[in-house]
Amino acid sequence: MMDFRQEGPKIAAVIRGKKSPATSMSYHEDGEHLFVTSEADCRLLMIDCNRGVSEKPAIKFEKDGVRIVQSTHHNQSLLYTGSGRERNQSSGEKHAINYHSIHDNKILRQFRGHSETINNISMCPVDDTFLTSSADRTVRLWDLRQAGSLALMEMPKGGNGMTIDPNGCPIAAFDSTGLVFGITAPMEAQAGHIIHLYDARNYGSGAFSEMKLESKILLNAIQTTFPSMQPMEASDLCGAQWKSMTFNKSGKQILITTDTGIVVMVDGYDSNKVTNIFLSKGVNGGPNGNQAAVACFSSDDQTVLVGNENGTISCYDSLDGSLLRTLEGHVGKISCVASNPKYAQIASACTNVALWLW
């Protein structure tokens, strides 16, 4: 039980990094390992979550770089994207997804098809398929067992009067069952965002649910939650670019992070129903409007964890949005936060990685 009310977690282990902050982290489904990347340091750590140590020396990717990491069902293999450092690489090579064996320290397979930066990798929880979304305005479905993509989906076309921003980037993610995945994309003229839900077994038939979060609805929710906020600041937060989309285990809530420090929770069946809004805090403790927010659900869905620029983690009740606890211990801004899928443990990172236990 992850009880943030009576007694919050304490730092049980710190795994030292180098000079640059972590870029991405992903727990393996068995909860035994945590993978952490640092793009600037070109390093990947594999952390033993039971012993609180880096299991092996950091793997260096000095040629291609490393940015996003995603665990797979195999505890010694993972997916990662490079940072496009090599000038002589083709576009397909720069924006490939690599299936990497930690045990052998070699690439098992490359998945090529995207022509621009990949912004998300989402592994299906029940089989070997995974989704990627990219700045090339496409979403691709892949299978670890074959190199070519299974499906290519252009940015969702607007329905019900929704017009898609021609310059906007989609984000794709599976839900916890693997039976449904969602694709979100910005609407034209900052009118809001759409969220389309697909049956993973019958995606060719199109979205079975077309939702949207209109900017006017979000603006009203921001002003209601933060009545003292200046109208211009609220408007700027409302127009933020979405950076990630996560379903809770029940699928009833969707958590969205943005590039301006705002974190939005919407109803999984009606995205125009904003259930909670959280703000990442800046160095002085006020709203952090200049940095992308990082946030996640706790593994029991009861809490939302939001990383702050001042090195703290705000723990909010996922039902009423109340602040339950603030965790302190990092020396720099929180760049990643994640919840262990099996054990009562959370992980957070600045330049160092901290494992928290009750």
Image: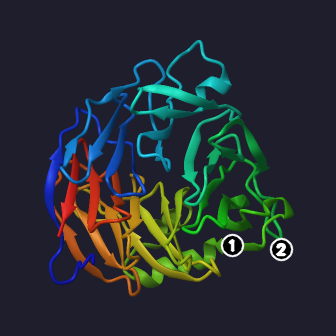
Q: Quadrant of the C terminus?
A: bottom left
Residue at disc 2, secondary structure: loop
Q: Is residue 16 left or right of residue 218?
A: left
Pointer 2 and pointer 1: residues touching (CB < 8 Å)? yes
Q: Which residue does the image show at 42% across and 53% down from the upper left?
A: 292
Q: Position of residue 86 (x, y in %)?
A: 52, 17
Residue on which disc 2 sits: 160
Q: Which residue does the image show at 48% across and 22% down from the upper left?
A: 64
Q: Is residue 297 left or right of residue 3?
A: right
Q: Is residue 152 left or right of residue 10?
A: right
The amino acid type of the residue labelled 2 equals: Asn
Give the image quarter of residue 105. top left
Residue on which disc 1 sits: 212
> Nearest the camera: 11 or 196?
11
**Label 2 crowd bin: few (<14), some (14–19), many (20+), radius 10 Å:** few
Give the image quarter of residue 263. bottom left
> Nearest the camera: 45 or 42?
45
Q: Position of residue 173 (x, y in %)?
A: 59, 58
The amino acid type of the residue labelled 1 equals: Lys
Residue at disc 1, secondary structure: strand
Residue 108 visible at all? yes
